[in-house]
Amino acid sequence: MNDFNQQIISEFRANQGKVGGQFQGATLLLLTAKGAKSGKVTTFPVVYTRDGDRFVVIASKGGAPTNPAWFHNLRANPEATAEMGSEKLSVRASIPEGSERDRLFDQMAAVLPGFAEYQKNTTRRIPVVVLERTD
């Protein structure tokens, strides 16, 4: 998966946020966060939608039984960086619960139905993460 992510990151940065393959046309951002255990800074490509001025990402990991590493990183270290196109923003992550989580998840699944399928494929409640600009 690391090589796969690295190829997307390289293509994203070389083409001001545009990538081909399975993510062609998707709203993609690069999320850079400090590791929860290692403290190492790592970048992950994630699909996002917007909720007003906020960016919404879903920790689906394709419906796997565990959350993605970036989710654990953001929970431990919510200060992060998001790259969209050629713009780089400082963001702070929060994890909504209850009806707010459901609203944001359903909003994203309406635009990108794959997320509803991912939820059906796992017993865990897939977390939603909200990124808000801090700069």
Image: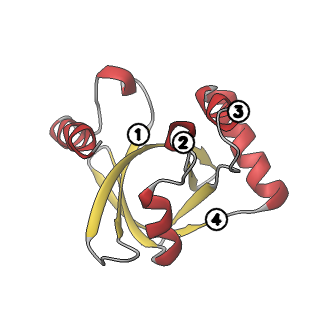
Nearer the observer: mark 2 or 4; the answer is 2
The earlier-in-sequence mark between 3 and 4 is 4
Regarding mark 4 in the picture, which secondary structure is present there? loop
Q: Quadrant of the N terminus?
A: top left
At 59% from the left and 59% from the top, the residue drawn is 130
Q: CA distance from mark 4 to mark 1?
A: 19 Å
At 34% from the left and 51% from the top, the residue drawn is 44
Q: CA distance from mark 3 to mark 4?
A: 21 Å
Tag shown at residue 64:
2
Nearer the observer: mark 2 or 1; the answer is 2
| Quadrant in which residue 80 is drawn | bottom left
Regarding mark 3 in the picture, which secondary structure is present there? helix
Residue 53 drawn at (x, y percent):
58, 55
Q: Amino acid at mark 4?
A: Ile
**Which residue is the site of mark 4?**
95
Q: CA distance from mark 2 to mark 4?
A: 19 Å
**Which residue is the site of mark 3?**
120
Q: Amino acid at mark 3?
A: Lys
Regarding mark 1 in the picture, which secondary structure is present there? strand
Residue 120 drawn at (x, y percent):
70, 33
Q: CA distance from mark 3 to mark 1?
A: 23 Å
